[in-house]
Image: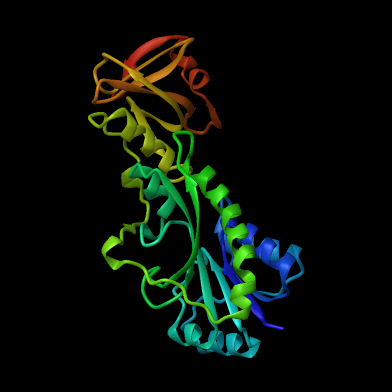
Amino acid sequence: MARIAFLGTPAVAVPVLRALAAAHPVAAVFANPDRPQGRGRKLEAPPVKQAALELGLPVHQPESWKLPETRSLWESLGIDLAIVVAYGHILPTWMLDGCSPWNLHFSLLPRWRGAAPVNHAILSGDSETGVSLMKIAPGLDAGPVLAVSRRPITLEDSADALLGALAEDAAALLMAHLPELLAGPLSPLPQDEAQVTVASKLDRSMSVLDFSRSALALHRQVRALQPWPGVELALGELRLKVCGVGGLRACGETPGTLRWDKGGAWLSAGDGQALELTGLQRPGKPIQPALQALQPWGASGRITADRIP
């Protein structure tokens, strides 16, 4: 029987691990080392490790694949097939040459290779995204693709919710093609290099709203940056995080005007439209419905985004 290893770290990889373990024995699970988390900086196991231990699977957490002991460990396991989901390491050539390694990547390759494909798909206004089952090869997500699963992107989709749905799609995609992966040989299709786009890492500089942009662009920005780095709305010295948005409507207000009443909270943009704010977070507070978060300034009001009245 083929010996399978699973390599992944965050929660988005867990549905694939669970589906794989239910279908075939998993010889080993690899995840990133435990890291300090939260204000107390207490060591916390990554979600894949937690799930693997629940399933009774052996877990390995090498700090680096460049260490001789990591190579010795891997070679001692005799792995035939490796399934990778958001592992967080660049795998060495010797490992790629020694087994059949496949990655489930959360985009429709060759669009959005890289670290944050779902976020960039929303930011760019893509109409759809998906999961690609790709043979791992040297280069950034550059290997040939065996199969894809597609999913539309709607105005209700935030990055975290969409990624959760794609994680389930990835599990289904793997289960549909696992017999092929085990039987081999396969003929995945090479990617069209002329169509490549790269999804760069997210950073906090992306958090600030530019009110000269269109309401739709701001709407996408809020949805794409959930839960991190989030989007900030500056009200004088106070910064609110915008955690949820609703519809769009025509608006004659100056860009950056926030108006709220019993009909909702609306932020004007640079194209004569406004976006509805549905969720806000004040410093040190949980996420609240927008009207509740704005209650300190009254049940209704109109302010600009650079000052408090």
Q: Position of residue 87 (x, y in %)?
A: 52, 67
The residue located at (31%, 58%) in the rendering is: 197
The residue located at (59%, 79%) in the rendering is: 81
- Say above or below: 144 vs 306: below
Quarter of the image with the N terminus in it: bottom right
Q: Where is residue 303, by image quadrant? A: top left
Quarter of the image with the C terminus in it: top left
- Say above or below: 213 vs 169: above
Q: Where is residue 9, by image quadrant? A: bottom right
The residue located at (36%, 62%) in the rendering is: 110
Near-viewer residue (226 or 238) = 226
- Say above or below: 86 vs 92: above
139 displayed left or right of 94? left
**Res 43 visible:** no
**Res 274 visible:** yes
- Say above or below: 277 vs 160: above
244 displayed left or right of 49? left
Near-viewer residue (232 or 210) = 210
Near-viewer residue (253 or 60) = 253
